[in-house]
Amino acid sequence: MTSDQRPGGGEPISIDSCDDVLSHVFEFLDHETDQARRDVIAEHLEDCSGCLRQFGIEQEFKALVRRRCGGDAPPPGLRDRIKLQLTSVSFEEDGTQVSVERVTIERTQERPTA
């Protein structure tokens, strides 16, 4: 997917890869993105089965946290702390066993040598 221009000539909405989409998936789920970015992400999800699958996992994860917090808003930063520590999770809901494993790859940039 390519960058799109925001309506009204604003800053471009850059969704150039699956990583870009997945880095904004929680904001998409929480309706914390503007409509133009939501449209770009939704279009990518329609076209990319891998991202759509990951989106479904994130959606289920968010629902699980909501249920386990008893309807209270989770503490600030909880999502980020869990995402950093989460490698795999298994739970059973309504007789369905769900297992999720996540592999996080950290990218490092090499500095040019002088």
Image (cartoon, rainbow, N blue to C red):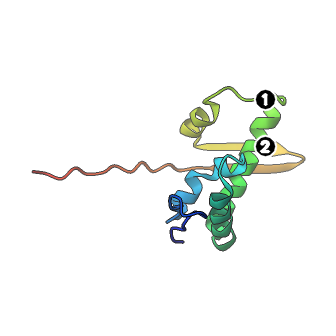
* Earlier sequence position, callout 2 versus callout 1: 2
Along the horizontal axis of the image, is 7 left or right of 67? left
Q: Residue at x 51, y 71 (%)?
A: 2
Check the image and name the residue furthest to the right: 94
Along the horizontal axis of the image, is 13 left or right of 93? left
Q: Quadrant of the N terminus?
A: bottom right
Along the horizontal axis of the image, is 67 left or right of 43? right
Q: CA distance from mark 2 to mark 1?
A: 10 Å
Q: Position of residue 74 (x, y in %)?
A: 72, 29
Q: Residue at x 58, y 49 (%)?
A: 102
Q: Residue at x 70, y 53 (%)?
A: 57
**Compared with residue 38, is residue 108 higher up or lower down, i.e. above or below?**
above
Which image quadrant for residue 6?
Answer: bottom right
Q: Position of residue 72 (x, y in %)?
A: 80, 27
The residue that label 1 is drawn on is: 69
The residue that label 2 is drawn on is: 63
